[in-house]
Amino acid sequence: MPPGASTFDLEAFLNSLIQRLFPAWYANQAVREMPLHDMGSLNPNSFLSHRWLSMHSVIQAMQGSLENAGPDWQELHQLLGKLIVEKDYQRHLSVSAIHGVEYSTHEDEFPNILSYAEHALQQPQWQQEWQTTEQFEHHLLQAFPQQDIPHRMVYREWDGRYYWLNKEEPLHLAAVLMHCQHKQRDARISASINVESLHLPTLDAIRSKYWLILMQRDDAYQVLQLLDQAGFGVIPCEFEWRRSDLLILAGRKSNRKLNNILLSLQNNRSSQQVTDLGRYLSRHYYPFRNQ
């Protein structure tokens, strides 16, 4: 560029001017065109329950973000505290219904309990330990002895998964499930099932009053900057601690212009890029069969 030549960027100047004059309109246009990144699986498949989406952790993180956010956000803080309810049921449960376990020394990424069983039973002393009816009954009693009745399970209504609160390596359960899989057999055990439920009236209240927009963190901060410049009261909330790459933007649905912007953000987008947490929970609901 010759000496003294202007470095004035007309396009940047006009964008800045339009943003100052019409911040809500500008934000609405900008979020439509903004490239978004995939968030990955929110609720990973694993035989280990502690790798699943933890709604307890999500709520704890969100409440922590809202705790000092001022009086305008205390209603949401309180609603979140009422979202999960728990109740114990004494029931007979099919062992084949178990999706995962609380404890294992294996930290490999097995997507389900059967894939773990196939790997664990490759040990020479276990390879032939699940074939016969006698072996099946033996391992069933070893995994779930009479003296431990009722056996402690957890059921989560937001994904329909059962997991066993075990204290030892679940090799006996692995042998039982391999037999069930290959011999088309099942067994029922006496269980105390802790059912983790969503309080649906509370979820409905949250959905009717608040946006809880979940996005990849960097994308969320870009949206937040646009909304801040337009004067909208939106607050960032942490997601669960294992997913520090994600962020929730909480906003009130009482502002029509904000609603239009957040609807534009989600329009024609994959739920892998942006999703409303309230809507996600409403769609992922598997009620416990109390029978």
Image (cartoon, helix red, strand yellow):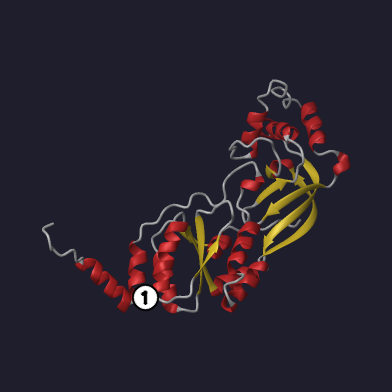
In the picture, measured across the screen, residue 286 lies left or right of residue 133, that is left
Question: Which quarter of the figure is the C terminus placed in?
Answer: bottom right
Q: Tag 1, which secondary structure?
A: helix
Residue 276: x and y, percent? 51, 63
| Rendered residue at 45%/61% (across/down) | 220
In the picture, measured across the screen, residue 231 lies left or right of residue 193, that is left
Residue 145: x and y, percent? 84, 38
Quick check: can you spot residue 253? yes
In the picture, measured across the screen, residue 142 lies left or right of residue 252, that is right
| Rendered residue at 44%/78% (across/down) | 256
Q: Is residue 140 above or below residue 5?
A: above
Question: Which quarter of the figure is the N terminus placed in?
Answer: bottom left
Q: How many numbered marks appear?
A: 1
Q: Is residue 12 above or below residue 37?
A: below
In the picture, measured across the screen, residue 102 lies left or right of residue 138, that is left
Residue 205: x and y, percent? 60, 73
Quick check: can you spot residue 263? no
Q: Is residue 69 above or below residue 277?
A: below
Task: Indicate the amino acid at tag 1.
Answer: Ala
236, 83: nearer the viewer? 236
Q: Is residue 175 above or below residue 48?
A: above
**Mark 1 highlights which residue?**
24
Q: Determine crowd level at label 1: few under 14, some 14-19, many 20+ residues with C-alpha closer than 10 A.
A: many
| Rendered residue at 61%/42% (across/down) | 46
